[in-house]
Amino acid sequence: MSLFDGQDKTPLYDAVVSYANENKISYHTPGHKHGKGIAKNFRQFVGEKVFRLDLSVMSEVDSLHEPSTVIKEAQVLAAQAYGADYSFFLVNGTTGGNQAMILSVCDPGDKIIIPRNAHKSVISAVILAGAEPVYIMPKIDPGTDLILNLTPEQVEEACRQHPDAKAVLVTNPTYFGLTTDLEAIADIVHRYDKIFLVDEAHGGHLHFHSGLPKSAIDSGADMCVQSTHKHLAALSQGSMLHVKGVRVDIMRLKTTLQMLQTTSPSYIIMASLDISRYQMVHEGEQILTDVIKMCEDARAEINKIPGLSCLTRETAQKFPSLDLDVTKLTVSTKGLPCLGYDMAKILNSEYDIQTEMSDFQNVLLFVSGGNTPKEMKKFVAALRKIVVDYKDMFINQKKRKSILFPHFIPHKEVNPREALTKLTRKIPFKRSVGKICAEIVCPYPPGIPVLCPGEVITQEIYTYLMNVLDSGARINGQSDARLQTIKVLEDESEAGASDQKKLFVIG
């Protein structure tokens, strides 16, 4: 069946717009009553029509929890468009999707194999499920300090060592666009009779262009979740969860989604998912062709700027099984005495260019159909000017040491969920080395936890987090945003001499 067969409809979007145009008198939620009750300055800025699309659950626009008409039809169209058997609209982002995936396949005590650089929503899902995480530490590229993706060999070794694991979850692409050989991993996971899950938050566009790495569903994943709002044209919080094959219990998944998702979903977000699917089916190939060209042209120019380098597909493919989603631009400042954080701040404050994220030596851009070649030329020109204008400052500035993401897995003394139920106390973070952490500590972006509940705090982790704070980056998840204090387990007798234990990389 062609991708276009039956894909000329937008049932949910049409139903929401149709109802909004009827201008019915509202005695139902939301309380702003089609925008008439909204504060005047808000209404003047955004216009009136948007509030008429903000609807409540009613027969004309269906129900997300028990879809039977337009939402059901829109989700069926999404499944057809993405090559899935089932697709589900999500209104709380891929965070909710990751939680739904894990909670629908894992029972308390079940092992699940995951990368250590998984998003914190994956860790929270493991905690909620009461599952036992088995971590694989991806390797780090010493040239760029980037965390690479998992390889099939690493996944197979983990499956071999943990034959009782229920599922394997892989993040693909990574935040920086690095992908792995999902087809090979799917074969391995299924050979070991496990369920294959993919956090595809940053890959919702891959299915729609043959020049990009293969999508999760196309590669044999049993279930994946995508942030449609990240690279496509859905509104923030709009994501999709896709299922293919017979390994996933669909009824349990539906029940899990009902427990996790709000009973008052945003119809504006859901309508944007419907229209985004339509757009990608009919225009996606051309949109992405233009984006790829824009990125590759910029990548070539950036790599001519002294002191800067931009990650290329050729560089990524030098690593076994890896590839690159070229719609993401990773600019390294390693050739300058300038941190990525510094570069991002200059771009923002002096050139009105807001990047997706930065770290010690990289600046990351997400490029989509909403960007233009003119904007990209402005970005490249800004980089050239910054390197020249700040040359003296960079030379005279004492460069802070770039600290790699801790390349080991902290020793786990207590199951993550159990750690959250034990007695805890707050202590100064500077005195925390050797103690058992009782909360998630997560530099953001990219949202990868450095510490999870139940893990021992090491000197290496303490030093890394202090350098992150010193650079001006944010750390969240913990109760003290400034990380002057941290929650640890009250009873630490088990920690003893194991305060420096590490479980090193598998593979």
Image: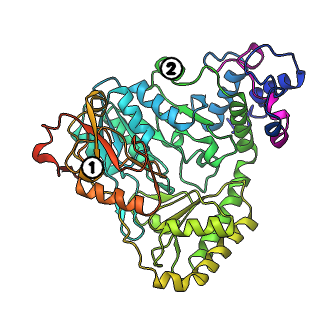
Categorize mark 1 by other alpha carbons within 10 Å: few (<14), some (14-19), many (20+): many
Left or right, 396 with respect to 72, comes to: left
Tag 1: amino acid: Ile
Number of residue marks: 2
Left or right, 232 with respect to 112, comes to: right
Based on the picture, tell me whether residue 99 belongs to the magenta stretch: no
Label drawn at residue 498: none
Q: Which residue is mark 2?
A: 259
Q: Is residue 408 above or below residue 97?
A: below
Query: Residue 419 sits in which quadrant?
Result: top left
| Front residue (pair 485, 458) | 485
Element at label 1: strand
User: At x 12% / y 37%, what residue is drawn?
Assistant: 493
What stretch of residues is rendered in magenta?
44-64
Based on the picture, tell me whether residue 48 belongs to the magenta stretch: yes
User: At x 23% / y 51%, what residue is drawn?
Assistant: 431
| Front residue (pair 132, 400) | 400
Counting from the top left corner in percent of width and height, residue 376 is at 69, 67
- Marks 1/2: CA distance? 32 Å
Visible residue check, residue 147:
no
| Front residue (pair 109, 404) | 404
Element at label 2: helix
Counting from the top left corner in percent of width and height, residue 91 is at 61, 31
User: At x 64% / y 41%, what residue is drawn?
Assistant: 236
Tag 2: amino acid: Met
Q: Residue at the left extreme? A: 497
Counting from the top left corner in percent of width and height, residue 328 is at 57, 59
Q: Which residue is mark 1?
A: 409
